[in-house]
Amino acid sequence: MEIEDGGLKYKFEGKYHIPRQGDYYLSSTGEVCRATHDHYTKERAIVTRVRPRHEFDGLIFEETDSARYIMVGEWFLLNGSPCGWKGPNQTYGRHIPLTLIT
């Protein structure tokens, strides 16, 4: 089952456990939350983020995060296409970082 929350997509695969730091889970109201610590006491429905993939010149990239300022050496999404990694003197503002898959 896929869930959309805040423009991002998540997938529920039937897993229930006490959330660990960094896990995404469904709150009692059905919203997707991210565990910020390891002190949860109740089991929750665990969801995983569906990360969109982009193909460019035969290479496949996967989105790794929501939009943020890009670090030196990172690949990122620029105008809907993967862009070469950022150099030390370039400023692009907030974009979606990518990971090279193949």
Image (tube, grey):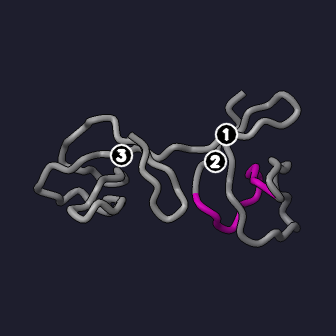
Residue 101, x across and y down, in percent? 68, 32
Q: Amino acid at mark 3?
A: Val
In the figure, 51 relative to 14: above or below? Answer: below
SS at circle 2 = strand
The residue that label 3 is drawn on is 47
- 3 or 1: tag closer to the N-terminus: 3
> In the image, which residues are magenta?
66-78
Badge 1 marks a residue whose secondary structure is: strand
Q: Nearer the viewer, mark 3 or mark 2?
A: 3
List x then y, in percent, for residue 95: 72, 63
- Residue at image position (23%, 56%) is 38
Residue in the picture at 41% in, 44% down = 48
Residue at which label 2 appears: 63
Residue 15, percent from left and from top: 25, 37
In contact (CB < 8 Å): disc 2 and disc 1? yes
Instruction: Give the CA separation, mark 3 to mark 1.
Output: 19 Å
Image-based side of 93 in relation to 18, left or right: right
Q: Which residue matches tag 1? A: 53
Q: Quadrant of the N terminus?
A: top left
Sequence-wise, the earlier of marks 3 and 2 is 3
State which quadrant residue 17 falls in.
top left
Q: Please state which amino acid type lies under the numbered disc 1.
A: Arg
The amino acid at mark 2 is: Glu
